[in-house]
Every structure is written in C-alpha cells, then in structure tokens.
Image: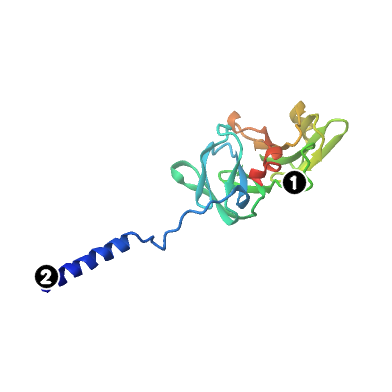
Amino acid sequence: MGKNLSIFISFLFFLFIFFIACQCIPSLETEKDITPSQYAQVMCVNCAPMFGKVKLAIGGIILHNSLSYDLEEGFKYMNVLPGVTNFVVSYKNDSVVYNGFANLVKGQLYTFFIIQLQRRVNGLLLNDSISNYSPTNSYFRFVNLALNSPSYLLFNLEQQYPLSFSLNFKNYTKFYTTYPEKYKITISDLEKDTILFQAKNFEFKPGKGYTIVLRGDLKAKEPNYGCNVLILQHNFDDLITNPKNK
C-alpha cells in the first residue's frame, strides 16, 4: 500500500510540473502591431556646423546614430510614437548637448532642426501638415537658421511675380501653396544690399513640399561653418495620399 501511495504521489508531482510548464506567463504579452497611422512622423535635420555628426533619440529610441551636417544620411520621415516625448541630441562620447520636450500628435508630420548657437545647440520643431492638400499643387516655406543674421534678411520666391518675406534668426514662414513651376529663389542682406544665395531655375514638383533653409554662421571664419542654403523636399504625394502612411 505504501509503495502504491508513493508512486501515486510521484505521478501527481510530475503532472503538476508538466501543467505549470505549459502555462503562458500572464505578465508577458505578445508585442502589439503598431500601424503607421498610430505614429507621428519626424524628419530630423542637422543645421549646426560645429556639431558635424550627432546622435538623436526621440522618446528613448535612437533615430540617428550619426546625423551629419554634410547630408550623408539624407532626409526622410521616421515613425515616432505620439504624445509628450523628449528629444535628446548627443555629441562626442555621448555628451548630451540638447534635451527638450514636445507633444507629437498622431498622424502629423514634423521637421526637427538642430540649430547652431554660439557654442551649443538648440532645437526647433515645425509642424509640416498641410490643410486642404492637393497632389497637383506644390508647397514651400522659408526658414532662417543662420547664426549672426542681420536684423532682417529678405527671402524671395519669384516666377511671374515675387513673394518676399523678411525673417530674423530662428524665424520661419508657414507652408504656402503654389503651382508646379521653375522658380527663382533669392536670399538677400538688405543692410549690405548683397545677395547671399540665388537659384534661378529651381523646379517645384507637383505634390511636393520644399523647405528652404538658410543655415550656418554669417560671421564664421572657417569655410565649413559659413552660411549656406539647404532645400529639403517633402514627399507629401506619397506620405499623404498613400493609405499605408495615413
């Protein structure tokens, strides 16, 4: 009888171990599929020449290990979870040079600029969303991120007639709607009556947006830190009309 009882108890013990091993641990959940519509999308641009390559994390997720001032990675929108989140820019040896917070809205497009100050950087987040978007139109805006800008710089876009905007440092326009054409783009220093930049036949394509950025340092002694123009193309025709990116 004692031997049979011992065998029975051993059977129950192994049955219990088998039962436990087959159970799913309740604290571990299968990763949920997050569709593009549940994200905000952010394009990141390094406009700080003294900080040639930086690491950028948004919400604790590293988007760029080496975001270059020299455009090595190109520019594209990247998915970021919406809500109040922090933007952290790190330089050599992971030294944090910028840490700021912003509220990202689901389904919205943004551009985050890393701005050169005297010996440090700042951040500028712009909302890229277009109201009443049409794939047959083009869109443009100007942004002045050139350190040591004079009181006013004149940003001019001309096709049949000119559109002019006076912008100080860290100032920008909204996105304006225009037609797909070739345009003359001019940025002038009104105080010195000089032209800083000019492109005579820059093509605006249908469904695209263009951000014309003046960056660098107008008083820089080193050529690599000097003033230059960066024109970003926003592929709204794909991002807005493609159902996968809605």
Which part of the image, by quadrant, shows the N terminus? bottom left
Tag 1 and tag 2, C-beta contact below 8 Å: no
Q: Residue furthest left?
A: 2
The percent position of residue 221, horizontal first and vertical second, equals 60, 32
The percent position of residue 114, horizontal first and vertical second, equals 60, 43
Q: Residue at x 34, y 59 (%)?
A: 22
Tell me if residue 10 comes above or below residue 119 in the rendering.
below
Q: According to the image, label 2 marks what residue?
A: 3
Q: How is the structure coloured here?
A: rainbow
The total of numbered circles placed on residues is 2
Q: State the separation of the CA atoms marked 1 and 2.
A: 81 Å
Q: According to the image, label 1 marks what residue?
A: 130
What is the crowding at mark 1: few (fewer than 14 residues within 10 Å), some, or many (at least 20)?
some
Q: Which quadrant of the view contains residue 46?
A: top right
Circle 2 sits in a helix, a strand or a loop, which is it? Answer: helix
Which amino acid is tagged 1? Ile
The percent position of residue 168, horizontal first and vertical second, equals 73, 44
Q: Residue furthest bottom?
A: 1
